[in-house]
Amino acid sequence: MSTTVSTQKPESKSSSAGRAGDSIFSGLSLAAGILIFVVLAAVAIFLFLQAVPTFTAAPEDITGGKGFGAYIGPLVVGTIISSVIALLIATPIGILVALYISHYAPARVSKPVGYVIDLLAAIPSVIFGAWGATVLAPAMVTLYNWLAEHLGFIPFFAGPASQTGKTMLTAGVVLAIMILPIITSMSREIFTQTPKLHEEAALALGATRWEMVRMSVLPFARPGIISSVMLALGRALGETMAVALVLSSGPMIASLIKSGNQTIAAEIALNFPEAYGLRLSELIAAGLVLFLITLVVNMIARAIIARYKEFSGAN
Protein backbone atom coordinates (compact mmCIF):
# COMPACT_ATOMS: atom_id res chain seq x y z
CA MET A 1 0.00 0.00 0.00
CA SER A 2 1.64 3.21 -1.20
CA THR A 3 1.04 6.60 0.15
CA THR A 4 1.29 9.65 -2.15
CA VAL A 5 2.71 12.66 -0.41
CA SER A 6 1.73 16.00 -1.94
CA THR A 7 4.67 18.39 -2.23
CA GLN A 8 2.57 21.33 -3.42
CA LYS A 9 2.67 24.13 -0.89
CA PRO A 10 -0.52 25.95 -0.03
CA GLU A 11 -0.85 29.25 -1.79
CA SER A 12 0.23 32.09 0.49
CA LYS A 13 -1.94 35.10 1.11
CA SER A 14 0.86 37.43 0.04
CA SER A 15 1.16 35.86 -3.43
CA SER A 16 -2.62 36.05 -3.92
CA ALA A 17 -2.60 39.68 -2.89
CA GLY A 18 0.30 40.30 -5.22
CA ARG A 19 -1.51 38.84 -8.21
CA ALA A 20 -4.62 40.85 -7.34
CA GLY A 21 -2.50 44.00 -7.15
CA ASP A 22 -0.97 43.23 -10.55
CA SER A 23 -4.43 42.80 -12.06
CA ILE A 24 -5.64 46.07 -10.58
CA PHE A 25 -2.55 47.95 -11.74
CA SER A 26 -2.81 46.41 -15.21
CA GLY A 27 -6.46 47.44 -15.44
CA LEU A 28 -5.70 50.99 -14.30
CA SER A 29 -2.86 51.29 -16.81
CA LEU A 30 -5.07 50.05 -19.63
CA ALA A 31 -7.84 52.46 -18.62
CA ALA A 32 -5.37 55.36 -18.57
CA GLY A 33 -4.11 54.47 -22.03
CA ILE A 34 -7.64 54.20 -23.41
CA LEU A 35 -8.53 57.53 -21.78
CA ILE A 36 -5.72 59.25 -23.65
CA PHE A 37 -7.02 57.98 -26.98
CA VAL A 38 -10.59 58.96 -26.08
CA VAL A 39 -9.55 62.51 -25.16
CA LEU A 40 -7.46 62.81 -28.33
CA ALA A 41 -10.35 61.59 -30.47
CA ALA A 42 -12.78 63.92 -28.68
CA VAL A 43 -10.53 66.92 -29.35
CA ALA A 44 -10.17 65.99 -33.01
CA ILE A 45 -13.93 65.50 -33.45
CA PHE A 46 -14.72 68.79 -31.71
CA LEU A 47 -12.26 70.72 -33.88
CA PHE A 48 -13.57 69.12 -37.07
CA LEU A 49 -17.23 69.74 -36.30
CA GLN A 50 -16.61 73.35 -35.32
CA ALA A 51 -14.48 73.90 -38.44
CA VAL A 52 -17.01 72.50 -40.92
CA PRO A 53 -18.63 75.93 -41.62
CA THR A 54 -15.25 77.23 -42.74
CA PHE A 55 -14.72 74.34 -45.15
CA THR A 56 -18.17 74.79 -46.68
CA ALA A 57 -18.18 78.60 -46.81
CA ALA A 58 -17.69 80.55 -50.02
CA PRO A 59 -14.06 81.66 -50.57
CA GLU A 60 -15.00 85.35 -50.50
CA ASP A 61 -16.50 84.95 -47.01
CA ILE A 62 -13.18 83.77 -45.54
CA THR A 63 -10.73 86.32 -44.14
CA GLY A 64 -8.73 87.67 -47.08
CA GLY A 65 -11.45 86.81 -49.57
CA LYS A 66 -9.46 84.05 -51.28
CA GLY A 67 -10.56 80.94 -49.42
CA PHE A 68 -9.32 79.04 -46.40
CA GLY A 69 -6.21 77.72 -48.17
CA ALA A 70 -4.96 81.20 -48.93
CA TYR A 71 -5.71 82.26 -45.35
CA ILE A 72 -4.07 79.34 -43.55
CA GLY A 73 -1.12 78.88 -45.93
CA PRO A 74 0.98 81.85 -44.73
CA LEU A 75 0.23 80.94 -41.12
CA VAL A 76 1.44 77.37 -41.65
CA VAL A 77 4.61 78.65 -43.31
CA GLY A 78 5.22 81.10 -40.47
CA THR A 79 4.66 78.40 -37.86
CA ILE A 80 7.07 76.00 -39.52
CA ILE A 81 9.76 78.61 -40.19
CA SER A 82 9.80 79.93 -36.62
CA SER A 83 9.95 76.38 -35.23
CA VAL A 84 12.74 75.34 -37.60
CA ILE A 85 14.78 78.41 -36.65
CA ALA A 86 14.30 77.55 -32.98
CA LEU A 87 15.41 73.95 -33.53
CA LEU A 88 18.46 74.94 -35.57
CA ILE A 89 19.62 77.18 -32.73
CA ALA A 90 18.55 75.15 -29.69
CA THR A 91 19.41 71.59 -30.76
CA PRO A 92 23.23 71.86 -31.05
CA ILE A 93 23.46 74.15 -28.02
CA GLY A 94 21.22 71.90 -25.93
CA ILE A 95 23.12 68.73 -26.83
CA LEU A 96 26.51 70.34 -26.16
CA VAL A 97 25.36 71.73 -22.80
CA ALA A 98 23.95 68.32 -21.87
CA LEU A 99 27.27 66.64 -22.78
CA TYR A 100 29.19 69.21 -20.76
CA ILE A 101 27.00 68.67 -17.71
CA SER A 102 27.04 64.87 -17.93
CA HIS A 103 30.60 64.06 -19.03
CA TYR A 104 32.90 67.05 -18.76
CA ALA A 105 31.97 69.41 -15.94
CA PRO A 106 32.95 68.64 -12.32
CA ALA A 107 30.10 67.98 -9.89
CA ARG A 108 30.42 71.41 -8.25
CA VAL A 109 29.75 73.00 -11.66
CA SER A 110 27.38 70.53 -13.32
CA LYS A 111 24.76 70.62 -10.57
CA PRO A 112 24.32 74.44 -10.49
CA VAL A 113 24.29 74.59 -14.29
CA GLY A 114 21.67 71.83 -14.39
CA TYR A 115 19.52 73.71 -11.88
CA VAL A 116 19.72 76.91 -13.95
CA ILE A 117 18.74 75.06 -17.14
CA ASP A 118 15.77 73.45 -15.37
CA LEU A 119 14.77 76.84 -13.97
CA LEU A 120 14.43 78.24 -17.51
CA ALA A 121 11.61 75.78 -18.14
CA ALA A 122 9.63 77.24 -15.23
CA ILE A 123 9.61 80.80 -16.59
CA PRO A 124 6.18 81.69 -18.08
CA SER A 125 6.13 82.18 -21.84
CA VAL A 126 4.72 85.69 -21.49
CA ILE A 127 7.95 86.69 -19.71
CA PHE A 128 10.01 85.43 -22.64
CA GLY A 129 7.70 87.29 -25.01
CA ALA A 130 7.96 90.55 -23.10
CA TRP A 131 11.75 90.25 -22.95
CA GLY A 132 11.91 89.44 -26.64
CA ALA A 133 9.72 92.41 -27.61
CA THR A 134 11.34 95.02 -25.36
CA VAL A 135 14.98 93.91 -25.13
CA LEU A 136 15.93 91.42 -27.83
CA ALA A 137 13.99 92.93 -30.75
CA PRO A 138 15.58 96.42 -30.54
CA ALA A 139 18.99 94.87 -30.06
CA MET A 140 18.59 92.83 -33.26
CA VAL A 141 17.87 95.87 -35.49
CA THR A 142 21.58 96.54 -36.11
CA LEU A 143 22.12 92.92 -37.15
CA TYR A 144 19.10 93.03 -39.46
CA ASN A 145 20.37 96.19 -41.15
CA TRP A 146 23.76 94.52 -41.69
CA LEU A 147 22.12 91.39 -43.11
CA ALA A 148 19.94 93.42 -45.46
CA GLU A 149 22.94 95.42 -46.65
CA HIS A 150 25.45 92.58 -47.15
CA LEU A 151 23.26 89.51 -47.66
CA GLY A 152 20.15 91.08 -49.12
CA PHE A 153 20.57 89.06 -52.32
CA ILE A 154 19.44 86.00 -50.32
CA PRO A 155 15.61 86.02 -50.18
CA PHE A 156 15.56 85.23 -46.46
CA PHE A 157 17.55 88.40 -45.73
CA ALA A 158 15.99 90.70 -48.29
CA GLY A 159 15.33 94.23 -47.05
CA PRO A 160 14.18 96.65 -46.03
CA ALA A 161 14.97 95.38 -42.55
CA SER A 162 12.46 95.93 -39.79
CA GLN A 163 13.33 98.90 -37.57
CA THR A 164 11.34 97.45 -34.66
CA GLY A 165 13.12 94.08 -34.65
CA LYS A 166 9.80 92.25 -34.41
CA THR A 167 10.52 89.66 -37.07
CA MET A 168 10.37 85.92 -37.62
CA LEU A 169 14.07 85.57 -36.81
CA THR A 170 13.57 87.28 -33.44
CA ALA A 171 10.65 84.98 -32.70
CA GLY A 172 12.81 81.99 -33.60
CA VAL A 173 15.53 83.10 -31.18
CA VAL A 174 12.98 83.53 -28.37
CA LEU A 175 11.51 80.09 -29.10
CA ALA A 176 15.02 78.60 -29.12
CA ILE A 177 15.62 79.90 -25.59
CA MET A 178 12.25 78.52 -24.50
CA ILE A 179 12.83 75.00 -25.85
CA LEU A 180 16.49 74.83 -24.82
CA PRO A 181 15.70 73.42 -21.33
CA ILE A 182 13.63 70.59 -22.86
CA ILE A 183 16.42 69.41 -25.15
CA THR A 184 19.13 69.89 -22.54
CA SER A 185 17.33 68.18 -19.65
CA MET A 186 16.16 65.15 -21.63
CA SER A 187 19.51 64.70 -23.39
CA ARG A 188 21.38 64.99 -20.10
CA GLU A 189 19.27 62.24 -18.53
CA ILE A 190 19.83 59.98 -21.53
CA PHE A 191 23.59 60.64 -21.56
CA THR A 192 23.91 59.71 -17.88
CA GLN A 193 22.14 56.39 -18.57
CA THR A 194 24.81 55.21 -21.01
CA PRO A 195 26.17 51.85 -19.71
CA LYS A 196 29.41 52.51 -17.86
CA LEU A 197 30.91 49.32 -19.32
CA HIS A 198 30.57 50.83 -22.80
CA GLU A 199 32.34 54.00 -21.75
CA GLU A 200 35.07 52.20 -19.80
CA ALA A 201 35.67 49.76 -22.66
CA ALA A 202 36.16 52.61 -25.12
CA LEU A 203 38.56 54.40 -22.78
CA ALA A 204 40.44 51.16 -22.08
CA LEU A 205 41.03 50.71 -25.81
CA GLY A 206 42.76 54.09 -25.90
CA ALA A 207 39.91 56.32 -27.05
CA THR A 208 39.94 59.95 -26.03
CA ARG A 209 36.98 61.32 -24.11
CA TRP A 210 35.45 62.80 -27.26
CA GLU A 211 35.95 59.52 -29.15
CA MET A 212 34.29 57.69 -26.26
CA VAL A 213 31.35 60.10 -26.41
CA ARG A 214 31.09 59.75 -30.19
CA MET A 215 31.29 55.94 -30.23
CA SER A 216 29.44 55.04 -27.02
CA VAL A 217 27.29 57.88 -25.67
CA LEU A 218 25.81 59.43 -28.81
CA PRO A 219 24.75 56.14 -30.50
CA PHE A 220 23.12 54.98 -27.26
CA ALA A 221 21.35 58.32 -26.77
CA ARG A 222 20.22 58.86 -30.37
CA PRO A 223 16.56 57.81 -29.84
CA GLY A 224 16.39 59.95 -26.71
CA ILE A 225 17.87 62.94 -28.51
CA ILE A 226 15.31 62.59 -31.30
CA SER A 227 12.53 62.37 -28.71
CA SER A 228 13.75 65.52 -26.96
CA VAL A 229 13.97 67.43 -30.24
CA MET A 230 10.46 66.36 -31.28
CA LEU A 231 9.06 67.32 -27.86
CA ALA A 232 10.76 70.70 -28.17
CA LEU A 233 9.35 71.06 -31.69
CA GLY A 234 5.86 70.44 -30.33
CA ARG A 235 6.40 73.22 -27.79
CA ALA A 236 7.63 75.58 -30.50
CA LEU A 237 4.74 74.79 -32.86
CA GLY A 238 2.12 75.48 -30.20
CA GLU A 239 3.65 78.52 -28.49
CA THR A 240 1.26 81.47 -28.38
CA MET A 241 1.95 84.46 -26.15
CA ALA A 242 5.69 84.74 -26.67
CA VAL A 243 5.28 84.72 -30.45
CA ALA A 244 2.25 87.03 -30.33
CA LEU A 245 4.24 89.61 -28.36
CA VAL A 246 7.32 89.42 -30.55
CA LEU A 247 5.81 89.28 -34.05
CA SER A 248 4.07 92.06 -35.88
CA SER A 249 0.73 90.99 -37.29
CA GLY A 250 0.51 90.73 -41.04
CA PRO A 251 0.78 88.40 -44.02
CA MET A 252 3.71 86.01 -44.23
CA ILE A 253 6.59 87.22 -46.38
CA ALA A 254 9.75 85.42 -47.47
CA SER A 255 12.27 87.54 -45.56
CA LEU A 256 13.13 86.71 -41.96
CA ILE A 257 14.12 90.29 -41.14
CA LYS A 258 10.98 92.13 -42.31
CA SER A 259 7.92 92.87 -40.23
CA GLY A 260 4.62 91.24 -41.08
CA ASN A 261 4.69 87.58 -40.07
CA GLN A 262 2.46 85.39 -37.94
CA THR A 263 1.98 81.81 -36.73
CA ILE A 264 -1.16 79.73 -36.26
CA ALA A 265 -1.04 79.72 -32.47
CA ALA A 266 -0.41 83.47 -32.25
CA GLU A 267 -3.19 84.15 -34.77
CA ILE A 268 -5.65 82.20 -32.63
CA ALA A 269 -4.51 83.86 -29.39
CA LEU A 270 -4.79 87.38 -30.78
CA ASN A 271 -8.19 87.02 -32.47
CA PHE A 272 -10.13 84.39 -30.51
CA PRO A 273 -11.57 86.64 -27.75
CA GLU A 274 -13.43 88.89 -30.24
CA ALA A 275 -14.26 86.19 -32.80
CA TYR A 276 -17.78 84.95 -33.48
CA GLY A 277 -19.68 83.23 -36.27
CA LEU A 278 -17.62 82.27 -39.29
CA ARG A 279 -14.54 84.03 -37.95
CA LEU A 280 -14.63 81.78 -34.87
CA SER A 281 -14.95 78.76 -37.14
CA GLU A 282 -11.92 79.95 -39.11
CA LEU A 283 -9.78 80.09 -35.99
CA ILE A 284 -10.94 76.64 -34.87
CA ALA A 285 -10.14 75.33 -38.35
CA ALA A 286 -6.69 76.84 -37.98
CA GLY A 287 -6.40 75.02 -34.66
CA LEU A 288 -7.35 71.79 -36.43
CA VAL A 289 -4.56 72.33 -38.95
CA LEU A 290 -2.07 72.90 -36.11
CA PHE A 291 -3.39 69.76 -34.39
CA LEU A 292 -2.77 67.73 -37.57
CA ILE A 293 0.72 69.20 -38.04
CA THR A 294 1.67 68.27 -34.48
CA LEU A 295 0.21 64.78 -34.93
CA VAL A 296 2.15 64.21 -38.15
CA VAL A 297 5.39 65.48 -36.57
CA ASN A 298 5.02 63.08 -33.65
CA MET A 299 4.22 60.16 -35.95
CA ILE A 300 7.35 60.88 -37.99
CA ALA A 301 9.39 61.10 -34.79
CA ARG A 302 8.09 57.72 -33.59
CA ALA A 303 8.91 56.19 -36.99
CA ILE A 304 12.47 57.55 -36.84
CA ILE A 305 12.98 56.29 -33.30
CA ALA A 306 11.62 52.84 -34.18
CA ARG A 307 13.96 52.68 -37.17
CA TYR A 308 17.14 53.54 -35.30
CA LYS A 309 16.60 52.16 -31.81
CA GLU A 310 18.07 48.76 -32.68
CA PHE A 311 21.31 50.53 -33.59
CA SER A 312 21.33 52.69 -30.47
CA GLY A 313 24.06 50.69 -28.75
CA ALA A 314 21.68 49.66 -25.97
CA ASN A 315 21.31 46.09 -27.30
Image (tube, grey):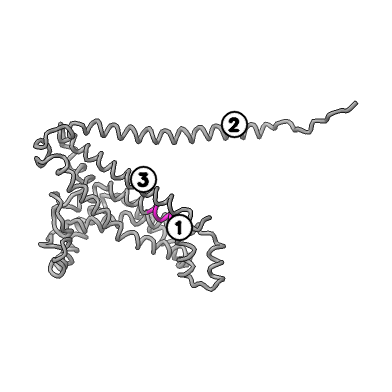
| Residue mark closest to the camera, 1 vs 3 | 3
Image point 18% across, 31% down: which residue? 53
The secondary structure that most of the magenta stretch takes on is helix
The N terminus: image quadrant: top right
Image point 58% across, 33% down: which residue? 21
Neighbour tally class for label 2: few under 14, some 14-19, many 20 plus, Cα within 10 Å: few
Q: Give the mark nearer the N terminus: 2 vs 3.
A: 2
Residue type indicated by callout 1: Ala
The residues tagged by marks 2 and 1 sit, at their Cα atoms, a distance apart of: 37 Å
Disc 3, SS: helix
Point out the residue furthest to the top here: 1
Residue 302 % position (x, y): 40, 48
Instruction: Judge whether residue 200 is colored magenta.
Output: no
Residue 308 placement: quadrant: bottom left
Q: Magenta region: which residues?
A: 220-228
Q: Give the mark nearer the N terminus: 1 vs 3.
A: 1
Q: Residue under label 2, please give it.
A: 20
The circle drawn on residue 221 is 1
In the picture provided, is 156 more to the left or to the right than 95?
left
Q: Residue under label 3, please give it.
A: 299
Image point 49% across, 68% down: which residue? 212
Neighbour tally class for label 1: few under 14, some 14-19, many 20 plus, Cα within 10 Å: many
Disc 1, SS: helix
Residue type indicated by callout 3: Met
Residue type indicated by callout 2: Ala
